[in-house]
Every structure is written in structure tokens, then in C-alpha cells.
Image: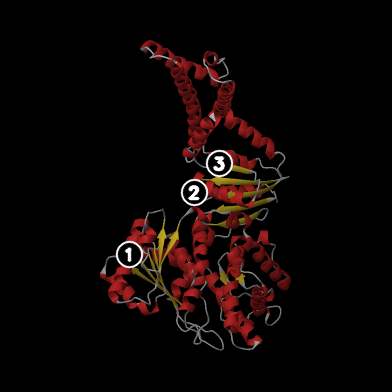
Amino acid sequence: MLLLLYVAPLVFVSVLFRRFSEMLRRIARVVYSFLFLSVFEIVIRLTMEDKSVPFGKVFEILSSGVYDAVQSITFTGTMAWIKGTQLSGFIKGEIWLIAFVASIVTVHSVVALIFGKFVHQLYMKLKGGFTKEQYIILGDIESARVLIKDICLHDKKPYIILIPTQKMNDDEMLYLKCRVEKPDYLKKISKNKKYHIVLLADHEYSNLDRVYQLNESGNGNLHVTVFLNNDVVRYHDIHADKIDACITSVDQVLVEKFMKESNPFKLLKEDGAFTQGGLPYLTKPFGICVIGFGKIGQEFLLRCYETSSFLTRDGSAPFRALVIDRFAEILEQEFVNNIPSLGESGEIAFLQTTVDSAEYFDAIKERMDGLHQIVVSVGDTRQNIDTALGLCRFFDRLGCYDKRPQIVVILSDNVAGAESLFKSYPNVKMMDFNSSIFNYADLIEVQIDSVAKEINDNYNRQSGKGKPWRELGTYLQAMNRAAVCDIPTKKEFSRMCDVPEEERIEFLARYEHERWCAFQYSHGWKRLPMDELTQEERDNFITKREQQKLHACLIPWDELDDLPQSSKGEFKSYDVANVNMALAYRNDPAKEK
């Protein structure tokens, strides 16, 4: 009974301090054990006195209780005070047992506080020598914590090496699960082990240096997922052909995650923008307004452009965009420099104004009938929320209750009550820069790559001139991943086609070609006029100039057969092959990812 009286509060103290660091929990357990033994002895000795105790005697008992408690928990005392009591042998045994348990708890806590980190790291190093598959995570502690937790849900006994980019406190979750190393550890990894390396978001360019260093090591057992600046990922072709690398950015992962739930195809279908019966042609363009044209706003716009290249009967543009920013003129120049084809197409209009101006509201009102989505990214989270609320009130005043565009609010940090503010506006969606993007499926498993590699292998077999996956570079790898992400759309289009099989496949192949062209344009490519091809290029069937980002295939589907090719219909056959593979694929790779 006495032992339970000691153990129950000890468990309660451990639970009460569970959210604190391991150091505080251990100190709390030691303090509790000391206080329990001290108070217990004092109470027992005072109750054993058969008459009132003088002050001097009380002070002696108090000091003796404190002294005996220290001796008991450090194994230096004999607890002689028990012999002078009239307690039963059973109770005396319980007291001895409590003192023993308290001693064990105290010694363990003290040793762990002083030597625990050293012992743990030594144990992890020894364990690492026998573990063939290891995880290495480099980045900030908060992001790493989320990823480590998710890894542990998928792998029962993972061996994780953490390389923190900031000073790390004695955090139990990381401390117990990981081996902590310094950044130069990446130069020491063995070639005899398999590594899953995740280089989390880095605002500098050091992650790019690390990728090149890992590639130069020639270790083919490295699977590396690395976050870089979004402009570097989208506009530069990075090659790491000696390792299995997945190079991305936080902006791309966030937008892709959002697109799985709400993309242009779904919004247009809800709007009834496709013809019924026969072939599903688009009857009106996808309309988007981006308010605030920072990096995330640009990435969102470009991904919408890439995924809204649907076929129209009259060949009109399937995409219309309005960009509103107080620095629109400067941002437009930068945008056109990076993506000249889109700048010249007239599909994107720029308006330089602020979110509280008459021009701002007039521009949105003017486009209301053709507007499907508004992305709010004017500044920090509070500014974005205020802007979105202002739009909701504006639509209320216009009397737009049933049909209003979807508003996507970019949240850069957590704000309590943000979702409650928009509870009465179901058209408002949040895109949160939260740590949920740091997960096993996206950063370790990367299932989408297995299908993308299959698409690349099929192209290599068909064309006889492709490269293995690792030698493609980030541009061609991203192109194959985009084809994988579009599989659900092709399948849905196929179900919407009420025509014979041959006509259905040709329609989907035409769409695939337009989607492919949109991807090239959004990555800075331009059309290479056929009459500018040199004789050498014609003789060798070369249709692109990679350094200049020029491609002769960026033309309408019906003109493809006019290009120099080894056999007529070769270029069209690539689109048909992608369609057939998409329709044959049983699962949804975007959801699997």
C-alpha cells in the first residue's frame, strides 16, 4: 500500500511534465523522491510520539528527515530511525523498498543528466555500424521533429542521424530517436550502406553545394531529397547523375499538395465548363486572380497554367489570369524575362495597385463571370486573412451568394481562429505553410517517382535516344513527374468522352500535347521556328536547343508531322503512348504520394 502511495504520484509527476524537456522531468522525479522520503519519515516519527513534541525535538526530526532522505537515495545511510518505531515488519519492508526504488530513480536520473547524452551517442554510433539502411536529416529542429515522427510510423526501428542547422536543446523526442552529428558528417558516409538523405529547406544555397558533394562521392546507394530555392528548381537544370536525387522546393510541395484537392480541372468541371456528349471541349477559360505576386503566388499561377491546357473547339486560350500587386510593373518585367512565351501570349494581365483601391475592386468585379480562383498572398498571414475577409464582404455586397470564385488564403504561420473566421464562407480554402509537408511519403518514399521512371523508360524504348532517370536532370525529371500527376485528369477525360475508341485516344493525345507545351512554356522555353532549323539539325532530327531553351515541337498537334523525324507520326506517337500508359495505370499516383 505504501509503495503504491509512492509510485502513483511519481507517475503523475512524469505525466504532468511530459511536455517539458527530459532534463526537467528527471529533476522533477528526483525532487519528488527526496520530498516523499523526507515528509514520510517526518510524519511517521511525529505520529509515534506519545505526547506533545517540544520545538527543539520537532526541529531535530525535521532536519533528521531531510538528512536521512539524502542518505537513503544515495545508498549511504542505514535508515536506523525505522528500528526505533513500532511499525510492523511488513511496513518496514515497504519503507526499505520505497527507499530502494527512490534511489534507483535518483541515480538513473542523475547519471542520465550527466552522462546520458554521451552514452546515447556512443550506443547510436555502435548501432550504426551494424545498420545497413539509415536516414540522415539535415535542417531546422521543428521540421526535423515532424519528419522523424512520421518516419517512425512507417519504419518500426529506424536508424536516424540528425544534423541540426541550429543549436539543439535536450529534446526527448530527438534525443531518444536520433544520433546527432555535424554537417561534415555527409563527407564520411559509407559506400556499403543505403542512405535516405533529406536536406530540408535552406534559405541560402548551401543545400545545392551539398547535393554536388554527395554526387561527387559516386555513392549509388544514396537516395537524396533536397529543398532548394524555387527559382533554382524551376528555371535551372541541375544534374546529379550518380545519386538518386529528388530536388524540389517548399513552394512546389505546398502547391502540389493543394492541387490534389482543388485544381483547375475540378473547378471547371464544377462550373459545367466542359461540353456534354461527344468530346469534352472547354467552353470558357479557367480564370485566376493572384493578389500578391511573391514566390508562392508565382508558383501557384504557373502550376494552374500547366494544368489547365484543355482543348477548346475554336482554339481559343484555355487560361486567363490577372495579377494584382503594388509592384506589378517590376514583377512583370522579371516574370517575362523568366517566362517569355507567357509574357507575349497576353493570357496574363498585370495591374499595379493596392488591395484597398477602387481599381482593385473594379478589376475583380469586371472579371467575376469568368473568375474561378483568387489566390491571396499579399504579405504575412494576418494581411492575407484581412484581404480575404475584405473580398468576402465585397462579394456579399455584390449579391454573389451561390456562385463566387474560390479564395485561396496563403498562411505563413499559425493564427488561432483563422478557420473560424471563414466558417460561413465555404469557398475560402487555406494553404498553410505547415510542417505536414515534411513526411515519409513525400520525402522518403516518393512513390510518384517510380511511375515517372516508368514513363521515361517507355520513352527510351520507343525513341531509342533517351537517357536513364538519374541522367535526366531536374528539368526532364520534373516533366515526367508532371505527366504522372496528370494521370487522374486523363482518366476522367476518358470517362467523359462519348465517342469511338480511336477518336477518344486522339483527343486525349491532343490534350497531352497541349499539356506538355504548357509545361515547357512555364519553365521558360520558347518555340523554335521550323525554318530556323539548321541542315545538321534536320539531318539528325534534332528539334531543340537546350542552352537557349528553344523547342521546335511547341506547335499545334496537326503541325507535328511537318517536323523532321525518323518516321512520320513519331512525335504524335509519344503523346499516344503517354495516354495509353495513363489509362492502363490502375491507381492514382498523386493520391499515393
| Image height of 188 relative to 215, above or below | above
Front-most of residues 573 and 175: 175
| Numbered badge on residue 177 | none
Q: Are marks 2 and 3 in contact (CB under 8 Å)?
A: no
User: At numbered mark 2, what does the secondary structure look like: helix, strand or loop?
Assistant: loop
Front-most of residues 232 and 4: 4
Q: How many marks?
A: 3
Q: Position of residue 398 (x, y in %)?
A: 29, 76
User: What kind of residue is marked 1?
Assistant: Leu
Q: State how far apart marks 2 and 1 are (Cα).
A: 34 Å
Q: Residue at x 58, y 72 (%)?
A: 488
- The coloring applied to the image is secondary structure
Name the quadrant containing residue 367: bottom left
| Numbered badge on residue 174 | 3
Viewer can see residue 235: no
| Image height of 122 relative to 356, above or below | above
Q: State how far apart marks 2 and 3 are (Cα).
A: 25 Å
Q: State how far apart marks 3 and 1 are (Cα).
A: 40 Å
**Left-right relation of 50 to 95:** left
User: At numbered mark 1, what does the secondary structure look like: helix, strand or loop?
Assistant: helix
Ranked by sequence position, the earlier of labels 2 and 1 is: 2
User: What kind of residue is marked 3?
Assistant: Leu
Q: Which residue is mark 2?
A: 204
Viewer can see residue 424: yes
Q: Which residue is mark 1?
A: 389
Q: Nearer the viewer, mark 2 or mark 1?
A: 1
